């Protein structure tokens, strides 16, 4: 539960100053990404839609972190679209057991491995996002 506790530390103080600070942080992140985007002349970002294959029934509460990429793009208000079944999970993808280098064998790592069981043949999606105002390119 250490990782879950660390992830929830931000929710202890829900006052106006914290909300303003969060909004300011979001604005700074958005501005920094926009500068990077323009400097590198990127058309889009391609990210995984999730970090695990399609979830089994009842797993969403254990693996909310698997949707971090999608939540991040939505939270920053970037237009995005999903392309399903870009990568097919093969047996070789499942051969080596993953243990997180920071969090070890915690409940999220265990839930992710459980999600991988029986996932051979399933498709993984990618998310394509672009800058605000460039919706038509997605």
Image: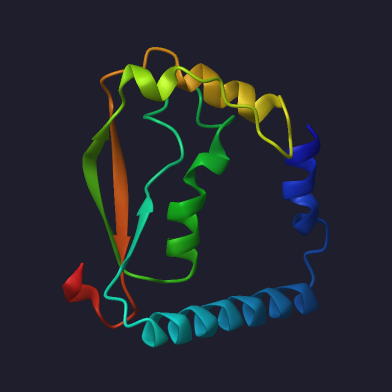
Left or right position of 131 against 116: left
Residue found 32% across the figure and 54% down from its top: 127
Residue found 64% across the figure and 30% down from its top: 108
Q: Is residue 83 visible?
A: yes
The image shows residue 35 at horizontal and vertical percentages of 46, 87
The image shows residue 48 at horizontal and vertical percentages of 38, 48
Residue found 29% across the figure and 60% down from its top: 128
Say which quarter of the image contains residue 53: top left
Seen from the viewer's position, the closer of residues 64 and 2 is: 2
The image shows residue 60 at horizontal and vertical percentages of 50, 31
Picture mark count: 0
Residue sitting at the far left: 136
Left or right position of 2 against 99: right
* Quadrant housing the N terminus: top right
Left or right position of 97 against 36: right
Say which quarter of the image contains residue 54: top left
* Quadrant housing the C terminus: bottom left
Q: Is residue 42 above or below residue 46?
A: below
């Amino acid at each position: 539960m250490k990782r879950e506790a660390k992830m929830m530390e931000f929710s202890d103080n829900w006052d106006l100053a914290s909300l303003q600070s969060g909004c300011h942080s979001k604005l700074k992140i958005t501005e920094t990404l926009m500068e990077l985007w323009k400097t590198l002349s990127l058309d889009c970002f391609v990210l995984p839609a999730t970090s695990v294959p399609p979830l089994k029934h009842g797993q969403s509460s254990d693996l909310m972190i698997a949707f971090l990429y999608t939540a991040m793009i939505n939270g920053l208000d970037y237009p995005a679209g999903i392309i399903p079944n870009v990568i097919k999970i093969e047996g070789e993808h499942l051969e080596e057991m993953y243990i997180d280098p920071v969090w070890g064998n915690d409940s999220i790592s265990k839930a992710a491995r459980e999600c991988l069981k029986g996932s051979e043949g399933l498709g993984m999606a990618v998310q394509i996002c672009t800058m605000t105002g460039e919706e038509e390119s997605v």
